[in-house]
Image (cartoon, rainbow, N blue to C red):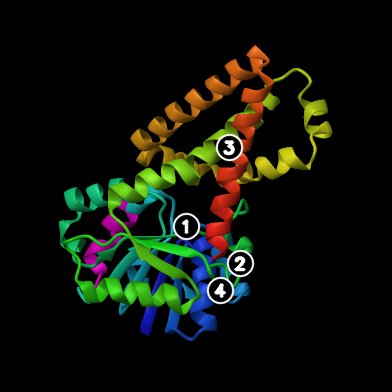
Amino acid sequence: MFEKVVIVGIGLLGGSLARDIKRHSLAASIVGVSRSPKTAANALELGVVDSVEPLTSALDGADLVVIATPMQAMPTVLRDAAPHLSSNAILTDVGSVKGDLYARLKAEFPQLMAQFVLAHPIAGGESSGVLASRESLFVDKNVIVTPTSEVAPSRVEKVHQLWQAVGAHTLEMSLAQHDAIFARTSHLPHVVAFALVNYLNAQPEREQLFDMAAAGFYDFTRIASSDAEMWRDICVTNTAEIVDALDGFIEQVTDIKQTINSLEQSEILDYFNAAKIARDAGLDRKKR
């Protein structure tokens, strides 16, 4: 499918994609780029990539470049990469926010617009780094492709084919739709998990609270162990949608607070049942 694939950022997503590209023989060679010597050494030792090189030399002859860094690092990568990229190379990413990256591309790197296929695999975990990468991470997961008017359909199709080849399901949506949906279904839950953990940690009896917390608490807050730098960048690059989602969530919390305080048992029961029904229906749809 490709001659030379370059993965910039050999963490959980970049490393897992590299593993699957290798496992399915989708590229003649896979070159990693990492700012961390330890990550580079681990990636080589684990056989995640064939070699690790500085960005400028890695790009020589590359026909696919996947940017798998935190969101705010992507413009720096593009700035350093732009003079060394072949016009035939396809650029893509794995970022959780699309509108901000597209705006940066349009303003700062218009020469790359025809090459860049924006994409977002809905996969991951609370662990980060190349040691957390694994084969088959993307099997039966959704990958959102957000094509723009500047990029050729043939390049968009190539990115679809890549993700499908590693077992993912691909679908397309607009930049705005993507950022609004994932602000509510991904970004908001992470912020809420971080906030709940920080709330307990601010209490005088915090050690007892964490010691006594049952599995439900740790299941609910599992994602609060996610990479802080990545989530800071997501909040900074999708601010308006996340704040809007938080406003809506705060309204819900206020409503249930008032309902509980009123001791209206039937209303409390109805509120909880409505959530159970909605969640169960969502899970049923996902299983089809």
Instruction: Check disc 4 and report the residue beneath it.
Output: 48
Residue 274, labelled with which disc? 3
Residue 181, labelled with which disc? none
| Of the pair 80 and 208, the residue shown nearer to us | 208
What amino acid is at disc 3? Ala
| Of the pair 56 and 85, the residue shown nearer to us | 85
Q: Tell me, yes or no, whether the two marked residues, 2 and 4, touch with CB atoms within 8 Å.
A: yes
Instruction: Check disc 1 and report the residue beneath it.
Output: 35
Q: Position of residue 193 (x, y in %)?
A: 60, 36
Q: Is residue 150 above or below residue 160?
A: above
Distance from Cα at disc 2 to Cα at disc 4: 8 Å
Distance from Cα at disc 2 to Cα at disc 1: 13 Å
Distance from Cα at disc 1 to Cα at disc 4: 16 Å
Residues rendered magenta in the picture:
75-86
Prevailing secondary structure class for the magenta stretch in the rendered image:
helix
Name the residue located 63 percent from the left edge and 28 percent from the top edge: 198
Q: Position of residue 187 (x, y in %)?
A: 47, 42
- Label 2 environment density (alpha carbons within 10 Å; few <14, some 14–19, many ≥20): some
Going from the N terminus, do you reach mark 2 or mark 1 first? 1
Distance from Cα at disc 4 to Cα at disc 3: 45 Å
Q: Tell me, yes or no, whether the two marked residues, 2 and 3, touch with CB atoms within 8 Å.
A: no
Instruction: Check disc 2 and report the residue beneath it.
Output: 42
Residue 146 visible in the displayed image: yes
Going from the N terminus, do you reach mark 2 or mark 3 first? 2
Number of numbered callouts drawn: 4
Q: Secondary structure at mark 3?
A: helix
Can you tell which quarter of the image residue 155 is in? bottom left
Q: Secondary structure at mark 4?
A: loop
Mark 4 vs mark 3: in front: 3
Mark 2 vs mark 4: in front: 4
